[in-house]
Image (tube, helix red, strand yellow):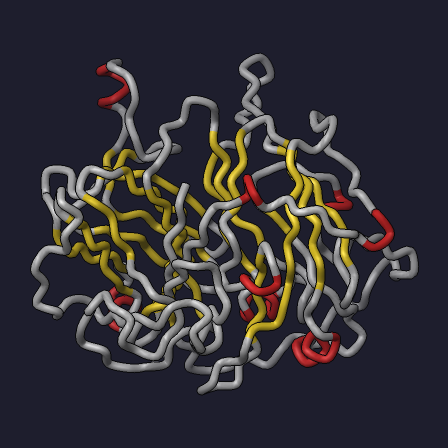
Amino acid sequence: MERDDLPDSQPEPKKPPRTAGLRTLLAVAVATITLGSAGTALAVQSGYFAEKPDGCVAPDRTVQLYAVELPRDPSTNQIRLGYGLTPETASYPGPTMEMMEGECLALTLHNQVPEATLAALRTDPNHPLGVSLHVHGVKYTQKSDGTVHNPGSYVAPGQSRTYTWFAKPRNSKTGSPGTAGYWWYHDHVVGGTHGTQGLNAGLFGGLVVRRQGDPRPDRTYVSFFGDRQSINLRRGAEVDTCDPVNPVPGPTCLVAKVGEKVEFIVVGIGNDMHTFHLHGHAWADTRTGLVVGDNKALVDSIPVIDNKTLGPGDSFGFTVVAGDAVGPGHWMLHCHMQFHSDLGMATSLHILDENGQMPPHNGHGPAHVHGPAAGSGAPAGAANAPAGNTVAGAADHTAHQPAGS
């Protein structure tokens, strides 16, 4: 909904006090990509439609997205917010969005976060109350920017508005690189000018933009590396049982069958540098992680890596063939900033054999625990999250959920 009564500018919020001893989190969070069936017709207050970027004649698809308050963390009382394709399936991270280059997507955001909750999160009493969608990588006009700098591009409590994203295709004549790649979206309003409290509370999700002809994965996992989260406060878990026995959100683990194409979307949030390292697997340092074609000179010029640096706001993605030449097994995934992995930035990718059976496991791998099925009384962070949601982690936090492609 467009708000004509919003001021043209807002005073700078006061800087929040620095807090010591912030714990580190690896949130490996993946939501099912279900946008093809997500466009249920719902009434939007005022019918406001955001201006479309050049190249977007009309939306190819529409999506309804909800921002809601989730149950608070039972140990810290930390406020939790999440995006969802329905209010009941809201989680953090939010649903993984998928677009094709050339596609125009209209997303209507419904703000169901209570006004009192937003007021409790802001760092300046004069800062406006609302939530927003700010996206990386694709094209949009300033009315879809999702910031307080562009009045009308965020959503007041109880209101709705539409954002328009355009996945501009590559243009070889002009040199425009297009928008195919691995991106993310997040709030840019809650708490202050930069939406820091919205990010801290869980308002973020992954976005993949594909180019025609890109190989399709069998499984997709979205990994968020960050701090200021309290996804799982259970410390010192020494086993990775890959079953729902521990009181943390979600039912499943990172799992694939040998030979399957497994896609990772990796995003850095928070304030720290990280690396993404996957044992037993390597990928080409290209847009997709795969090498296509028989041009030997071109292939030889592409680095092959198994560890990639990730800064705040960065995102990248790649695809590996599960168990390629190494077979089934339990393969560690972790940050190679050693004190981060020591604090719990580690989990496992479990690769099943050809019959879909879990290989033998002595239970002693990276600190890693799992939780109950979604909607079964799981604590804050993924309560009522999409089916298949998993939040896991130990000494300091790992969250993940599988996503189909």
Left or right: where 182 falls relative to 234: right
Left or right: where 395 falls relative to 122: left
Instruction: Give the residue furthest to the right.
Output: 5
Which quadrant is the N terminus positioned in? bottom right
Which quadrant is the C terminus positioned in? top left
Q: Residue at x 37, y 32 (%)?
A: 216
Q: Nearer the viewer, residue 53 or 239?
A: 239
Q: Is residue 14 visible?
A: no
Task: Please give the count of numbered marks on the rendered protein.
Answer: 0
Expressed as whole percent of the image width and height from the top left, the position of residue 115 reads 75, 75
Q: Residue at x 80, y 43 (%)?
A: 49
Res 397 → quadrant: bottom left
Expressed as whole percent of the image width and height from the top left, the position of residue 194 reads 65, 62
Expressed as whole percent of the image width and height from the top left, the position of residue 12 reads 75, 68
Expressed as whole percent of the image width and height from the top left, the position of residue 359 reads 10, 55
Q: Nearer the viewer, residue 229 or 250?
A: 250
Placement of 158 over or under 179, stated as above or below: below
Left or right: where 278 falls relative to 218: left
Q: Nearer the viewer, residue 308 or 229?
A: 229
Placement of 39 over or under 87, stated as above or below: above
Q: Residue at x 76, y 69 (%)?
A: 129
Q: Residue at x 52, y 49 (%)?
A: 184
Q: Is residue 11 visible?
A: yes
